[in-house]
Amino acid sequence: MLKRLTDIVLSLIVAVIFLIPAILVWIAVRATSPGPAIYWSDRVGRDNQIFRMPKFRSMYIDTPAVATHLLQQNASHITPVGRFIRKTSLDEIPQLWSILTGEMSIVGPRPALFNQDDLVALRTECGVHRLRPGLTGWAQVNGRDEISIPDKVALDAVYMQRQSFWFDLYIIGMTAQRVLVSKGVSH
């Protein structure tokens, strides 16, 4: 209950703080590439239920729905402002909606794409699938795009065992630090 209340309160505070930057990102995405500013991605949530997660669109609308590292010549799929909003994590702002609706939490394992069967299978095997996915998580602050799927799941399992209000606050603090220096973002 405390985690859910914290999610709601922090999401509302962050939404107010990032309202102007979100409007500016929306304008920049719309002005630099055709298509909507928000991309709704099918993701795997708690108990492996599929939900639609919003992000600011950082790729062209005809890009295949696969993990970015699996794209051939992934740089050619990124929009003019896409690299910047990904590097600064501004593309994640719309996920506050998913936190407010209860499909996500601020801290938890990052939600897998609907077709990341290897990641979903490993998380299910470890019991991590029972957690609500997060905007950030222990794997995010310990490597993000730079770690393998088995290592990511191992870190998610550590989070599952250690989760607490204070550990979540620690992860949020580490996330802010990592975002400020764009650490762990490879594309």
Image (spheres, rainbow, N blue to C red):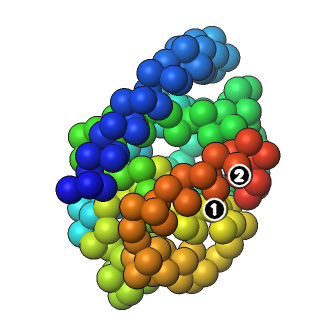
From the top left corner, tell me how far across and down residue 171 is, in percent.
55, 59
Say if 186 sits above or below 26 in the image. Answer: below
Q: Is residue 131 left or right of residue 83?
A: left
Q: Where residue 132 appears, x then y in whole percent?
A: 31, 61
Q: Residues within 10 Å of mark 1 (few under 14, many from 20)?
A: many
Q: Residue at x 71, y 51 (%)?
A: 178
Q: What is the secondary structure assignment of the residue under circle 1?
A: helix
Asked whether residue 150 is in view, the answer is yes
Looking at the image, the residue that sits furthest to the front is 166
Residue 39 sits above or below residue 29 on the image = below
In the image, what residue type sits under mark 1?
A: Val
Toward the bottom, the furthest residue is 125
Left or right relative to 129: residue 122: right
Q: Where does residue 167 sit, x and y in percent of width and height?
A: 48, 66
The quadrant holding residue 114 is: bottom left
| Contact (Cβ within 8 Å) of mark 1 with mark 2 | yes
Residue drawn 54% across the image and 77% down it: 155
Q: Which residue is mark 1?
A: 141
What's the residue type where badge 2 is placed?
Arg
Query: Is the N terminus in the top left, top right, bottom left or bottom right quadrant?
Result: bottom left
In depth, the one of 19 and 165 nearer the eye is 165
Query: Which residue matches tag 2?
Result: 178
Residue beneath the point at 36% across and 52% down: 105
